[in-house]
């Protein structure tokens, strides 16, 4: 009998292969997991199973109009970082929402952190078009109230993120607001826009809008879109805190305080106030007839100039130059200039150019109005002499009180709430003390003194705004009133009227330099205020605005 062939002998235990499959030197070592497979084609963002919110029954899954799976920043899917390493930026919740949203806007879309808390499965969020419409309406109020473009974008982004629209991109220009939401990289985006056609100065309304934004972004509040719409309608319906006659009286007191600041007495105060009141009433009349703002500024500048010329023709020893200069303080568009320079420094060059062009038009209107009256005065041989204002008498107590009265009346013209008028008044008084100490007492550079004083205004204003969770404009705009270049503007116009073109244009260039020093100083003070606060991105460097060193 032939024996059956047997197989190979069984290898010893220590010589057996580690697995049944063939081994290779390119195989992954035991214990090292491979990278996760690529995500499916249908979606760019796959949320782990069990954490996704229920899709809306009204729209198909993946639609741009479907309820977002991340309904709110407080209740949303957890952030996911791939194994191959994408740095996750974390934003502390105790930082102000303005700084957190500004930090996120300066990050690329792919690097922005997603919300971290899981959403409830039975929670349904608002529709996308409704959230976008609410965002545009709030952004319109902010832009029309004078806020900078970056602050408006941060507010719009904060609203969308609070209601679950994380992949959104707001865009703000001088007259147009636009926002785009894209659920994923493979879905069609939804875009909505709104045009700003009317602008108004009402800082009480601006403060109410910021309070609404703070409640929408606060974890302790749950403001639904319906509640936000109701509060927004109340903000629009609210009447101004001051009636028209109070605004006219405030314009007169502002002009009188400015003339006293430049060395005038009680009679100069009265005449300057009368000229400013007449100019304000003429401007209201032109506004009621539908004339553009250019002509409103033009006619408002004529009565103060006419009052100064009348004093000169009557040979009254009342410093006519102080009367004319005081009337110009209420007309110089300092608010628009600060916003224009802020937009330029933060990279919004189109909006900054449009704002600067608007300031230039208003400035030209003031020059034309005063120049028209001065040309008539020259024909009547009026001896207008600015020497009385070039060397004002040093009256520290009177000038400090005049600067504070100027700031208080300026705050009333800006329709500020009564709670912010006091701090704006004190802030303006401190700014004038700093300016006078450098420019008058120490005989230093007026441009440097203006920039330093404006920097303190911006610093204190930004700190107070962060403390009260509101805009910095009510604390800053009125406080820069004593620093406005009214004297340099008048001297330039007077020199041109007397056919001294070189001296006139040099004085107007100085006025422009002073105005830019105010705007840059306010912006720099605000940036310094943010340095004292905790950085929004923990462990990361704060991104610059738009571009850095031109690259």
Image (cartoon, grey):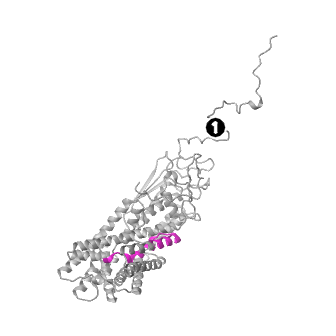
**Circle 1 Cα neighbour tier, 10 Å, few/some/many (<14 / 14–19 / ≥20):** few
Front residue of 77/542: it is: 542
Compared across the picture, whether 15 is left or right of 548 comes to right
Q: Which residues are magenta?
A: 458-487
Prevalent SS, magenta region: helix
Magenta residue check for 479: yes
- Answer with the quarter of the image where residue 537 lies: bottom right
Question: On screen, 155 above or below 463?
Answer: above
Going by the picture, which residue comes out furthest to the right? Answer: 1
Question: On screen, 417 above or below 38?
Answer: below
- Answer with the quarter of the image where residue 309 lies: bottom left
Quadrant housing the C terminus: bottom left
Magenta residue check for 30: no
- Residue 50, image x and y in percent? 63, 49
Quadrant housing the N terminus: top right
Question: On screen, 206 above or below 88?
Answer: below
Task: Identify the residue shown where x is 27% and y is 84%.
Answer: 320
Residue 81 seen anywhere in this rendered image of the structure: yes
- Residue 303, image x and y in percent? 27, 80
Compared across the picture, whether 381 is left or right of 426 comes to left
Task: Identify the residue shown where x is 32% and y is 72%.
Answer: 511
From the image, tell me which residue sits under label 1.
28
- Element carrying mark 1: loop
Residue 289 seen anywhere in this rendered image of the structure: no
Front residue of 454/215: it is: 454
Compared across the picture, whether 172 is left or right of 370 comes to right
Task: Identify the residue shown where x is 49% and y is 46%.
Answer: 187
- Residue 432, image x and y in percent? 41, 79
């Amino acid at each position: 009998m032939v024996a059956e062939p047997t197989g190979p002998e069984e290898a010893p235990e220590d010589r057996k292969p580690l697995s049944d499959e063939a081994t290779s030197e390119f195989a992954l070592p035991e214990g090292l997991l491979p990278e996760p497979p690529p995500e499916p084609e249908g979606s760019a963002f796959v949320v782990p199973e069990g954490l996704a919110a229920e899709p809306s029954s009204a729209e198909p899954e993946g639609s741009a109009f479907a309820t977002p799976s991340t309904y709110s920043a407080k209740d949303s899917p957890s952030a996911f970082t791939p194994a191959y390493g994408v740095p996750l930026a974390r934003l502390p919740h105790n930082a102000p929402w303005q700084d957190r949203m500004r930090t996120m806007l300066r990050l690329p879309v792919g690097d922005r952190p997603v919300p971290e808390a899981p959403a409830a499965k039975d929670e349904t969020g608002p529709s996308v078009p409704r959230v976008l419409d609410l965002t545009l309406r709030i952004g319109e109020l902010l832009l029309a109230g004078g806020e900078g473009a970056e602050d408006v974008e941060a507010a719009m982004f904060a609203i969308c993120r609070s209601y679950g629209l994380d992949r959104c991109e707001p865009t703000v220009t001088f007259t147009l607001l636009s926002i785009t939401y894209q659920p994923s990289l493979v879905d069609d985006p939804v875009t909505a826009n709104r045009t700003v056609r009317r602008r108004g100065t009402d800082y009480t309304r601006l403060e109410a809008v910021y309070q609404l934004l703070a409640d929408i972004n606060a974890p302790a509040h749950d403001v639904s879109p319906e509640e936000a719409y109701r509060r927004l309608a109340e903000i629009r319906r609210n009447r101004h805190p001051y009636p028209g006659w109070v605004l006219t009286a405030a314009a007169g007191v502002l002009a009188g305080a400015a003339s006293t600041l430049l060395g005038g007495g009680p009679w100069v105060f009265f005449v300057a106030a009368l000229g400013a009141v007449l100019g304000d009433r003429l401007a209201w009349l032109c506004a009621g007839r539908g004339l553009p703002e250019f002509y409103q500024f033009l006619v408002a500048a004529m009565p103060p100039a006419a009052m100064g010329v009348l004093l000169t023709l009557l040979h009254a020893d009342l410093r006519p130059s102080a009367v004319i200069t005081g009337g110009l303080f209420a007309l110089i568009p300092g608010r628009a200039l600060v916003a224009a320079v802020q937009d330029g420094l933060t990279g919004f060059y189109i909006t900054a150019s449009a704002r600067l062009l608007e300031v230039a038009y208003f400035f030209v209107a003031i020059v034309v109005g005063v120049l028209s009256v001065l040309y008539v005065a020259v024909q009547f041989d009026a001896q207008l002499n600015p020497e009385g204002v070039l060397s004002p008498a040093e009256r520290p107590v009177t000038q400090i009180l005049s600067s504070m009265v100027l700031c208080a009346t300026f705050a009333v013209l800006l329709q500020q709430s009564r709670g912010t008028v006091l701090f704006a008044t004190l802030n303006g008084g401190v700014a004038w003390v700093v300016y006078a100490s450098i420019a008058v007492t120490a005989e230093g550079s007026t441009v440097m003194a203006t920039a330093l004083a404006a920097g303190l205004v911006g610093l204190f204003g930004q700190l107070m705004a962060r403390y009260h969770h509101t805009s910095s404009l009510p604390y800053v705009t009125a406080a820069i009133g004593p620093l406005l270049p009214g004297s340099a503007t008048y001297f330039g116009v007077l020199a041109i009227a007397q056919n001294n073109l070189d001296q006139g244009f040099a004085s107007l260039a100085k006025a422009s330099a002073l105005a830019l020093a105010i705007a840059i100083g306010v912006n720099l003070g605000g940036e310094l205020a943010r340095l004292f606060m905790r950085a929004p991105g923990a462990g990361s460097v704060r991104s610059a605005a738009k571009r850095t060193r031109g690259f």
